[in-house]
């Protein structure tokens, strides 16, 4: 009807408050890990590396060679989603992220054994090569955030929650023993691992709905283990247990950007 005024069409307007509502973003940075493995070669009654009364030095030397600690730094990058609630100058929220991350710790070397001939005596010494490794592949976190607005555009926050990765521990043994085909063995075990993630950061509102952030995050996963056997190739009953465990902790230093809507 011509006498009725039509209500103008409303165009959705994005919020200008970067500290309220849902957001998505991307992150990238450096990950510095501290990894450690520990190995134990057992002296079984039917062992050829050692038995309860012969050459226990072999077990100690081989176990020491297949363990230790190390650190290194790698690149990490990923995506994130979250939601903020603002109460005055305080901001609370939940954030989840998924990142590409590969961290590993490998230890090993060669050892000259006293004798590997308990079953079929051979020349000494025999050179054994032994090692173990621990690694994590991929990282996802689910964390709470709590922060304070130092200014309308600058948020200082702390964060903490759960971390998820795939954790793998493996070990391996070979030697140059010329009798009965030498000896070989090892094992590998992989499983999802849940750990803790905590840290903090700064976030700046730099434009309408956009923020930049600098964040530190520490992730820590418990120990994972694997159990295997080292056997003489032609005499499989002549064998020793070979068990390894490992764990990795990582410190992440990341830069990111988010868009709120």
Image (cartoon, rainbow, N blue to C red):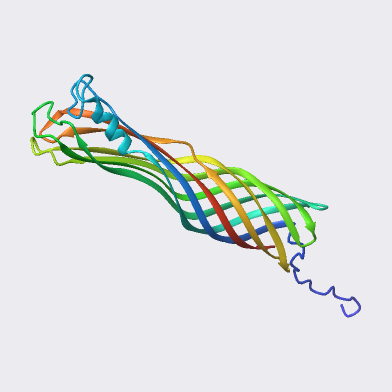
Q: Residue furthest bottom?
A: 2
Which residue occupies the foreground of this view, 75 or 138? Answer: 75
Q: How many marks?
A: 0
Residue at coordinates 43% horizontally, 45% vertically from top-left?
A: 166
x, y percent for residue 36: 42, 40
Could you tell whether 60 is left or right of 105 in the image?
left
x, y percent for residue 215: 62, 55
x, y percent for residue 105: 39, 46
Relative vertical location of residue 193 with respect to residue 29 in this rendering, above or below:
above
Which residue occupies the foreground of this view, 224 or 96? Answer: 224
Which residue occupies the foreground of this view, 162 or 243? Answer: 243
Residue at coordinates 40% horizontally, 38% vertically from top-left?
A: 246
Relative vertical location of residue 96 with respect to residue 122 in this rendering, above or below:
below
Instruction: Answer with the quarter of the image where residue 206 lies.
Output: bottom right
* Image quadrant in which the C terminus is located: bottom right
Residue at coordinates 72% horizontally, 56% vertically from top-left?
A: 21
* Image quadrant in which the N terminus is located: bottom right
Could you tell whether 19 is left or right of 214 in the image?
right
x, y percent for residue 233: 13, 36
């Amino acid at each position: 009807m011509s006498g009725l005024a039509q209500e103008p069409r409303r165009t959705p307007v994005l919020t200008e408050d970067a500290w309220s509502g849902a957001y998505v973003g991307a992150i990238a940075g450096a990950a510095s890990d501290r990894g450690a493995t520990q190995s134990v070669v057992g002296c079984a009654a039917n062992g050829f590396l050692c038995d309860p009364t012969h050459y226990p030095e072999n077990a100690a030397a081989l176990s020491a060679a297949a363990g230790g600690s190390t650190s290194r730094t790698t690149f990490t990058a990923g995506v994130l989603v979250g939601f903020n609630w603002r109460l005055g100058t305080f901001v609370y929220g939940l954030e989840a992220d998924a990142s590409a991350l590969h961290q590993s710790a490998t230890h090993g070397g060669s050892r000259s054994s006293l004798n590997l001939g308990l079953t079929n005596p051979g020349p000494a010494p025999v050179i054994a090569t032994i090692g173990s490794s621990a690694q994590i592949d991929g990282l996802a976190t689910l964390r709470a955030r709590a922060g304070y607005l130092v200014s309308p555009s600058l948020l200082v926050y702390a964060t903490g929650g759960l971390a998820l990765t795939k954790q793998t521990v493996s070990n391996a043994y070979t030697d140059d023993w010329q009798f009965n085909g030498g000896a070989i063995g090892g094992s590998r075990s992989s499983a999802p691992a849940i750990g803790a993630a905590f840290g903090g950061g700064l976030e700046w509102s730099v434009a309408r709905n956009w923020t930049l952030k600098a964040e530190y995050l520490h992730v820590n996963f418990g120990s994972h283990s694997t159990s295997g056997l080292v056997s003489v190739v032609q005499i499989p009953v002549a064998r020793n247990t070979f068990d390894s465990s490992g764990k990795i902790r990582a410190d992440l230093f990341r830069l990111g950007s988010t868009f709120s809507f």
